[in-house]
Image (spheres, grey):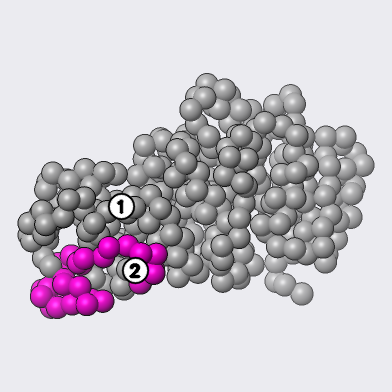
Amino acid sequence: MPCFNVAETIDEAMESLVNQTISEIEIVAVDDGSSDETSDLLADWQAHDVRIRVVSLAHEGIITALNQGLQFCRAELIARMDADDRCHPERLEKQVAFLETYEEIAVVGCLVEHFPPDKAREGFRIYTEWLNNLVTADSIAEAVFIESPLAHPSVMMRRVWLDRVDGYQDHGWPEDYDLWLRMHLNGARFAKVPEMLLFWRDHSERLTRTDSRYSVENFLRAKARYLCQGPVADRDGVIVWGAGQMGRRLSKHLLREGAHLEAFVDIDPRKIGCKRRDRPIIAPEELLSFLAQYENPVVLAAVGSRGARALIRERLTRMGLKEGEHWWAVA
């Protein structure tokens, strides 16, 4: 038996949904081959609330479960939530109101609070803090190649956008990040209701900890694929700022995707003048003259240490390089 049992939390999740203040709601609960008492609990909820529809599957995995659930959703606005989370009673009402007000927004999230507070891992706390600082459409667009900028169980999406990009897809990396990147490259705008409306449970059995598709390497594969379809497409000179572990790993996947990788930038004097992947490692002071060799170059900031992104952003801004045009943060 796993050390975490979804059936222990399903009642909390369902109660937070059935008690939403919005007047019209349909709840599609997808049971992806549970082996505990989840199916019995969902049947009981369905028997007592006509708004609930249960979809029972053999265990087919998250992507099939999501797409199957979408087929049973009849509304034009579709919200996501996991069986181990809880949401504020006004979450759906506020997200509907937001999308009705801002018709240009394809997906709206919200601020999230991790729980239980004494069990959340440091990495999860840091990620949640970063997520909650991304609220506006512009800030999310700038951060979309850093990490998944939306908590998947917190979002409400327009069905037309899900149909436009052919729903969830399996490429061997995180299905939610893949969806956001495909939407982004197709012109979608994301935003958040700036209120704490989802309570996001952390535990050892989360897919992000047990499924290899959520590994750092697979996140990098996803970034490289969509960078090369978006910001890096048609660039004759790609320069990676960061010759350390993150830059080295990302550059491998960029090359596999056909990027014109020309150099690395680093501040470590021991690396400057050396080569990485047979490309020169240059100092920041050399960057502008190096970029001048190319007609359409781009810089990718790929330093993963905390605080580095802000320092790189400040330096590139002083050089006159514009984020989202001349350079992108990718770590």
Residue 234 circle label: 1
Tell which tag, 2 or 1, sits nearer the viewer. Answer: 1
Q: Could you tell me the amino acid type at mark 2?
A: Leu
Tell me which residue sits at (40%, 42%) in the image.
140
Magenta highlight range: 252-281
Instruction: Name the side, left or right, on which 202 lies relative to 300.
Output: right
111 left or right of 15? left
Q: Tell me the quadrant of the picture where the C terminus can be found.
A: bottom left
What separation in Å lies between label 2 and label 1 (alpha carbons)?
A: 14 Å
The quadrant of the rendering that contains the N terminus is: bottom right
Give the residue type at disc 1: Asp
Residue 297 at x, y percent in the picture: 21, 53
What residue lies at 16% left-to-right and 55% top-to-bottom?
294
N-terminal-most mark, 2 or 1: 1
Question: Tag 2's secondary structure?
Answer: helix
Nearest the camera: 242 or 119?
A: 242
Q: Nearer the viewer, residue 156 or 131?
A: 156
The numbered mark at residue 255 is: 2
Residue shown at the point (89%, 55%) measured from the top left: 40
In the image, taking residue 213 as reference, residue 238 lies left or right, namely left
Q: Is residue 150 above or below residue 90?
A: below
Please tell me how crowded label 2 is: few (under 14), some (14-19), or many (20+) other residues with Cα within 10 Å: some
- Residue at position x 40%, y 53% in the image: 229
262 is within the stretch colored magenta? yes
Contact, CB < 8 Å: mark 2 with mark 1?
no
Q: Secondary structure at mark 1?
A: loop
